[in-house]
Image: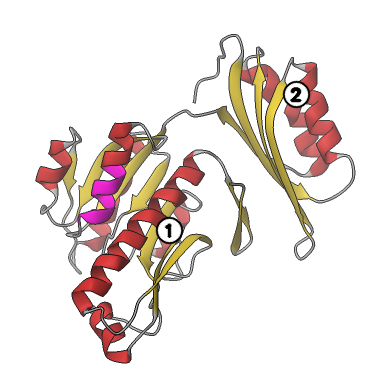
Amino acid sequence: MSTLATEGTAWVLSLSCPDGPGIVHAVTGVLAEHGGNITESQQFGDPDTGLFFMRVEVTSPAPRNEIAAALAPLAERFSMEWSLDVSGRPMRTLVLVSTSAHCVNDLLFREREGTLPIEIVGVVGNHDNLKDLTTFYGKAFHHIPVTRDSKAESEVALIGLVDDLDVELVVLARYMQILSPELCERLSGRAINIHHSFLPSFKGARPYLQAHDRGVKLIGATAHYVTSDLDEGPIIEQDVERVDHTFAPEALAATGADLERRALSRAVRWHAEHRILLNGHRTIVFR
């Protein structure tokens, strides 16, 4: 993250803290003192947790270090967690894949078209099936095989890439490997996964066939943050579509793939735009 700003830099400030009076006044006052012109502001007070959440986009001629220094006393006063970044700055992202191409292809295409505010700095696959697709988009492909005996060694190699490439966000784009609790903790709040909506009812390698056999009428996809609780991390986005008896298992799978692409791309966008704040096991998403 750059510590310097040019005239009229657009900043995005996101924060959370225990709810109470004077928070908005104090934050906007600091921004105003530094020539800030607020262009977007969203806030939410959660009565269940007693926490307050806020996201502000502001244009200011002040450098980041000055704004950060002015916010520091507020952070102490209100027990506040906060982040400040240049609005629209592409977030350095590493994508993990196995053999399914639909999600990573969508992310690569959206990044190339400039419609997703990320910079994909590499693609990691536990198989090499998607190497040609990755290189087609001009990205580096890293093959890190994973076996039962090599899992710990493979995760060390993955962590090395995260550190060497200065990765800010890790996206599991249908990566069919379970991350260790230690790796989940290290990537806490900055790793996003996508899966179909049939869990936990239809487990295993052929969930759409199972769904077809049961005659499901709704299918969907869930994007969530990765935690050590498999597929149970804080939910960011979900998408759903109605189906009927005319859908063969292949048609269900194709519809599910579309839903996975859509839900994952929205989750990645909102994370990169600092629109998501963690609220315990839930998320606040300022759209």
Q: Residue at x 28, y 79 (%)?
A: 207
Q: Is residue 94 above or below residue 218?
A: above
Please give the range of residues in magenta.
101-108
Q: Residue at x 59, y 22 (%)?
A: 10
Q: Within 10 Å of the Cα at label 2, are there few (<14), some (14-19), or many (20+) other Cα atoms?
A: many
Residue 7 highlighted magenta (yes or no)? no
Query: Amino acid under label 1?
Result: Cys
Residue at the far top: name it.
7
Which of these two is toward me, 16 or 87? 87
Which of these two is toward me, 113 or 77? 113
In this rendering, does residue 32 appear at all? yes
| Residue that carries the numbered disc 2 in the rendered image | 31
Please tell me in which quadrant of the rendered image residue 72 appears.
top right
Q: In the image, residue 186 lies at what x, y percent?
A: 45, 52
Marker disc for residue 184? 1
SS category of the residue bearing label 2: helix
Q: In the image, residue 132 lies at what x, y percent?
A: 9, 44
Residue 104 highlighted magenta (yes or no)? yes
